[in-house]
Amino acid sequence: MTLADLGYNDKFEKFRVEHNLSNFEIGRVISEHRERYVVKTIKGEFEAEITGNMRFTAKSREDFPAVGDWVALATHDFDYAIIHHILPRFSVIKRQAVGQFGAVQIIATNIDYAFLVQAADRDFNINRLERYLTICNSSKVKPVIVLTKTDLIDELQVDEILKSIKARIKNVPIIPISNETKNGYEAINIFIEQGKTYCMLGSSGVGKSTLLNNLSGKSLMRTDIISQSTHKGKHVTSHRELIILENGGILIDNPGMREVGIADTAKGLETTFDRIVRLSKNCKFKDCTHTIEIGCSVMEAVEKGEIDNASYENYLKMESEKSHFEATIAEKRKKDKDFGKMVKNYKKGINRKK
């Protein structure tokens, strides 16, 4: 196995050389368990921790390693290593941390494609798909919608679901599959390329672990039987893990996400709802909220049926979440800055007394 098999490329190598990291091993974080990591290198897998300096200088959780990261590390005996540097990420899939206002949770890094997985029977929800799309667009990750469990409904229902998705979401591939019969797997395999990294985003019980097992040809992830009363699977995957598939693709499995809070500061919403954003430029007022204003081009398009009403309401909800998140971040930064000034002034006062 080579580093290229794990997704390493010339850009990472250039950074390694330019920043004098040649004395370190290079590896990729393949799993994380409470700030302890498993890193895969050409020598094998190592359990790893970060240096004390990395922990001390970290300003947020984003400064810690995450699954998918390339890291420079010093390896030791007994399969143990210390991580000294994180190489720059070309993409970061993240969301608002659950229960922590203004905090970010990294889902995975250095991702090329994201499979947005939903079940055709009970889980299907276009609003949620638009949330996943916003996360991908903010992260510059290419999305592919995967509709699972199509064997549980008839072909007419599948066609109706596909039409409803295409009516609201444009230019995103949609692949209907069955994990039982494996119908549709050929279409998924077309997207999987050697050396490219993929992740799966979806709720618990939509068939992500079964999809991973089928794509790998191995029983890598435990799967539970679907409840007959709720038609929902139990939460099985409890951590993120990077797995190399037989065809050379690299797949990261994630826990099911009950909440998908938007942590969007990179115009992900504008890309997902590009038509609404384009129309908003024609609104009478520059600060139009698209809710009550006279001369709002967006509301006019909704009334004429040119924009789907559910999509419009979903946009307003996510825009509100985004604004609240950004305001919380700004408030936290101000508090940190004020605290830093207070500490600085306190130290100056002590020095004067001396």
Image: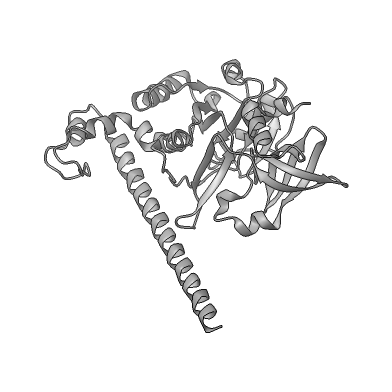
How many numbered tags mark residues here?
0
Residue 207 placement (x, y as % from top left) = 59, 33
Q: Is any part of residue 224 visible from this angle?
A: no
Q: How is the image coloured?
A: one colour
Q: At 35% from the left edge and 27% from the top edge, which residue is drawn?
A: 168
278 or 181: nearer the eye? 278
Which quadrant: the C terminus?
bottom right
Q: At 53% from the left edge and 42% from the top edge, which residue is drawn?
A: 230
254 or 48: nearer the eye? 48
Q: Is any part of residue 324 visible from this angle?
A: yes
Name the residue furthest right.
77
Name the residue furthest bottom.
353
Position of 228 with respect to 49 (left or right) is left
Residue 58 placement (x, y as % from top left) = 59, 55
Position of 198 with respect to 103 (left or right) is right
Q: At 56% from the left edge and 16% from the top edge, which residue is drawn?
A: 187
346 or 178: nearer the eye? 346
96 or 329: nearer the eye? 329
Up-down: is 342 above or below 172?
below
Position of 62 with respect to 36 (left or right) is left
Which quadrant: the N terminus?
top right
Picture quadrant where residue 178 is located: top right
Residue 104 placement (x, y as % from top left) = 50, 50
Residue 200 placement (x, y as % from top left) = 57, 34
